[in-house]
Image (cartoon, rainbow, N blue to C red):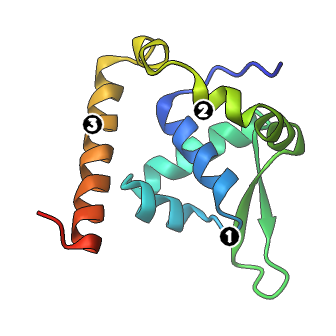
Amino acid sequence: MLKYDITLPQAQVIMYVLEHEKATVTTLSQNLGISQSTISGVVDRLITKKILIKMTCAHDRRLQFLRVMPAVRNYYDNNKNQLLDRPLEKIVSNIKTDNLDIIKNGLTMLLNSLNEANHID
C-alpha cells in the first residue's frame, strides 16, 4: 500500500489530474478555485514526492501537462472503490478545521454551479 503524507489541496490536485488527461497548472487553478501560485507550489511538492510528473507537449514545448506516476495510477485504479466507499466520518475526522472550510467552500461552489447549469433555485 502506498503511503504519502499529503494535504487536502494536494489530494485535490491528485484527484483532478487522475480524472483529466490534459491537466495543467492553469486548468487546475481555474477548476479548483486556487491561485496559480499556490497550485504551482502544490504541484512542485507532489513532483518532489514522486506523485506527479510534468510532460512537455510534443506540438508546443511551452505547454506542460501533469500526470500521476504509474505507481499512483495503479494504486488508484486498484483501490478506487475502497477509497470512495470509506465512511465519510472517518475521512472528515482527520481533516483540519481550516481544510474543512475549504471543502465547504468548494462544495458550495459546486452546488451553485450545478444550480446554474440546471436552473434550479
Depth check: 64 or 7 in front? 7
Depth check: 14 or 118 in front? 118
Residue under label 1, please give it. Answer: 22
Mark 1–mark 2 contact, CB under 8 Å? Answer: no
Crowd around label 3: few <14 · some 14–19 · many ≥20 (10 Å): few
Q: Residue at x 27, y 36 (%)?
A: 104
State the image coordinates of residue 42 (x, y, percent, origin top left). 55, 42
Residue under label 2, please give it. Answer: 84
The first of marks 1 and 3 along the sequence is 1
Q: CA distance from mark 3 to mark 2?
A: 18 Å
Kind of element beneath mark 1: loop
State the image coordinates of residue 121 (x, y, percent, origin top left). 11, 63
Which circle, 1 or 3, is nearer the viewer? 3
Residue under label 3, please give it. Answer: 104
Q: CA distance from mark 1 to mark 3?
A: 27 Å
Depth check: 80 or 1 in front? 80
Residue found at the very far bottom of the displayed protein: 59
Question: Which quadrant holds the N terminus?
Answer: top right
